[in-house]
Amino acid sequence: MKTNYRFAIALFVTLVTAAFTSKANTIAENKDNAAVLEKQVSVQYEGNAANSVVFRVAFENPTAQKFTLIIKNDAGDVLYNGQFNDAHFNKAIHLLKENSEMNPVFVIRSGNQKVEQAFKVNVNTDTEEEVVVTKQ
């Protein structure tokens, strides 16, 4: 009887330990994958055009896995949502200058990972137009 009881406890401890170890490995793996994805994404301010602010979005996607590019405004409204599977994605994004200040957020979502990059844009129009962009 004591042998069965000890066996049951040992089995229970083994199962619980395996479950936590598996979850810990998954969390560590997701952090590593997110770090890799972060290095593959580049969002840069390129300048301004007639009535827009221009950003360059690049994503090195060597496996050509399907990904989503989402652009949100500071209120969280989706301004753009597109799906791509380019291995070397590189796109110029023109955001209309509707306000003197805007805070666009660029999101690349691939699988269960995402990278967000936020910017603050101030447009000053006196006699000469000045655009100030800071990455947040």
Image: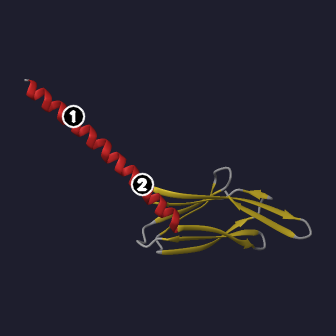
Q: Nearer the viewer, residue 83 or 121?
A: 121
Determine which residue is flagged by label 2. Answer: 30
Q: Secondary structure at mark 1?
A: helix
- Across and down, in percent, residue 108 comes to 53, 62
Looking at the image, the residue that sits furthest to the right is 127
For the N terminus, give its image quadrant: top left
Query: What is the CA distance from the residue labelled 2 to the residue labelled 1?
Result: 27 Å
Residue 35 vs residue 42: left or right? left
Left or right: 90 in relation to 93: left
Crowding at mark 1 (Cα within 10 Å: few <14, some 14-19, many 20+): few
User: Callout 2: 10 Å neighbours few (<14), some, many (20+)?
Assistant: some
Q: Position of residue 112 (x, y in %)?
A: 44, 55
For the C terminus, give its image quadrant. Answer: bottom right
The image shows residue 70 at horizontal and vertical percentages of 57, 60
- Seen in the picture, residue 75 relative to 95 is either above or below; the reply is above
Write the residue at 73% across / 57% down.
102
* Residue 106 position in % (x across, y down): 60, 60
> What residue sits 46% from the left and 75% below the top?
87
For residue 103, which quarter of the picture? Answer: bottom right
Along the line of sight, the residue nearer the viewer: 117 or 102: 117
SS at badge 2:
helix
Instruction: Judge whether 40 appears above or below 16 on screen.
Output: below
Residue on which disc 1 sits: 12
Disc with the residue nearer the chain's start (2 vs 1): 1
Question: Amino acid type of disc 1?
Answer: Phe
